[in-house]
Amino acid sequence: MRRVLFTLICLVAALPLRAAEAVTEFTLDNGLEIVVIEDRRAPVVVHMLWYKVGSADEPAGKSGIAHFLEHLMFKGTENLESGEFSRTVSANGGQDNAFTSYDYTGYFQRVAADRLELMMEMEADRMVNLRINEEDVRTERGVVLEERNQRTDSDPGAIFGEQRRAAQFLNHRYGVPIIGWRQEIESLTREDFLAFYKEHYAPNNAVLVVAGDVEPQEVKALAEKHYGPIAANPEIADRMRPQEPPQLTERRLTFRDPRVAQPYIVRTYLAPERNSGSQEEAAALFMLAQVLGGSGATSVLGAELEFEAKTAVYTAAFYGGQSLDPTTFGILAVPTPEVSLADIEAQMDEVIARFIEEGVDEDQLRRLKAQIRASNIYAQDDVGSLARRYGAALTSGLTVEDVQAWPEILEAVTGDDIIDAAERIFDPQKSVTGWLMRPDTATDEEVSQ
């Protein structure tokens, strides 16, 4: 078995590091950025329009407006009836949807390649001709509130996450939930949506990504035909957001809820994001997360706490590096029923301290790099995944060159780089530690009183 594993690692190591996809980029006169990713293996195309606006760009007191507007974009335009956009996509054998994040909002369709022009025509139409009436706002508000009920308010883990994130970001809008606070969702008006739409939805604030069975020049011609006539918004400026002040003290919180099935601890640290032309620090943090908690069987936390000490049923580490502004690095541990949160937290800290002192296992690092390289290769089989990779990057401050350089930068990360990153990131003053537990679970401090 070891011989087979060694052979597979050697085969993956021989594969190219750089992205294999053929990528062409150009910009229309009105400022629309266009990325074309060629993949001729199937007569399918993914058409994605990304706007450089997300929940972190919302004005204070209007949380949830970016996500709510995403819903309203599927209502009518001057040329399409309410719901006709999605019905047309479906009638042509395709699928469509949308998504909102902190840094972007995206709309996509996956259709047969010969339906690309139709998708461009409809998407360009709703970039400028959206029609919103009071009934649309009323009915869709109910949909959004129900989404919040199901995904957040009915899930103690999701509420816990909201509270931790609000504690992590003292000033930045990353501390506000993407879906918005309930009382602010309830107060948003038709005029709010129209103003937000007119302010942010314009070709010079968007990135078009087309991936699949296409010719770049054909895409350019179609884009010039349908998106080209739309005027740029001259008032769109660089994204200016409130930034974090120096974080000077550790924060801790305990969230109790009778619906909690399994108590756990999460700690997050303020962390630097991936920056264009300078991704090395983010790469080291990405690899640190993989080494510490990427896989229960082979990661440092998993091997020590799940398999050796048997005091945890699950451990993880995570890093949200693709972000326009500073982000977070986190660690998590779910203890076994007989182990307290205080004990598992102490053990988690001991494991990390020992890891920093002893350094990275070079065999483990080599295996991880082989797995990451294989994962990047497999991702090239999904044009939707490729389109998302480039769209999310370009709306988060990165470039096509940054995306293509990322595999080589990851490959160049050394064990020393990872330890250096760990020593910098694990700063208690920039941390939030949260305990999720049932109401009847006493903390160690309460037991001792």
Image: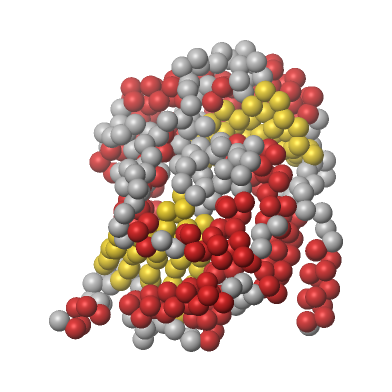
Judged left or right of residue 356, residue 429 is: left
Q: Quadrant of the C terminus?
A: bottom left
Residue under the point 62% across and 65% down: 416
Examine the image and state in which quarter residue 415 appears.
bottom right
205 or 146, nearer to the observer: 205
Q: Looking at the picture, how far across and down is residue 426, in whole percent?
A: 44, 63
309 or 61, nearer to the observer: 309
Residue under the point 25% across and 80% down: 444
Q: Quadrant of the N terminus?
A: bottom right
81 or 403, nearer to the observer: 403
Residue under the point 67% across and 23% down: 27
Residue 285 higher or lower than 403, as above or below: below
Residue 220 higher or lower than 155, as above or below: above
Q: Looking at the picture, how far across and down is residue 189, in whole percent?
A: 30, 27
Residue 368 higher or lower than 74, as above or below: below
Q: Looking at the picture, how far across and down is residue 277, in whole percent?
A: 63, 41
Residue under the point 28% across and 38% down: 184
Q: Looking at the picture, how far across and down is residue 136, in whole percent?
A: 38, 29
Examine the image and state in which quarter residue 285 appears.
bottom right
Residue 444 higher or lower than 87, as above or below: below
Judged left or right of residue 372, residue 291 is: left
Name, please, the residue furthest toward the left: 449
Examine the image and state in which quarter residue 8 appears.
bottom right
Total labels drawn: 0
Q: Is residue 335 visible?
A: no
Q: Is residue 411 visible?
A: yes
13 or 127, nearer to the observer: 13
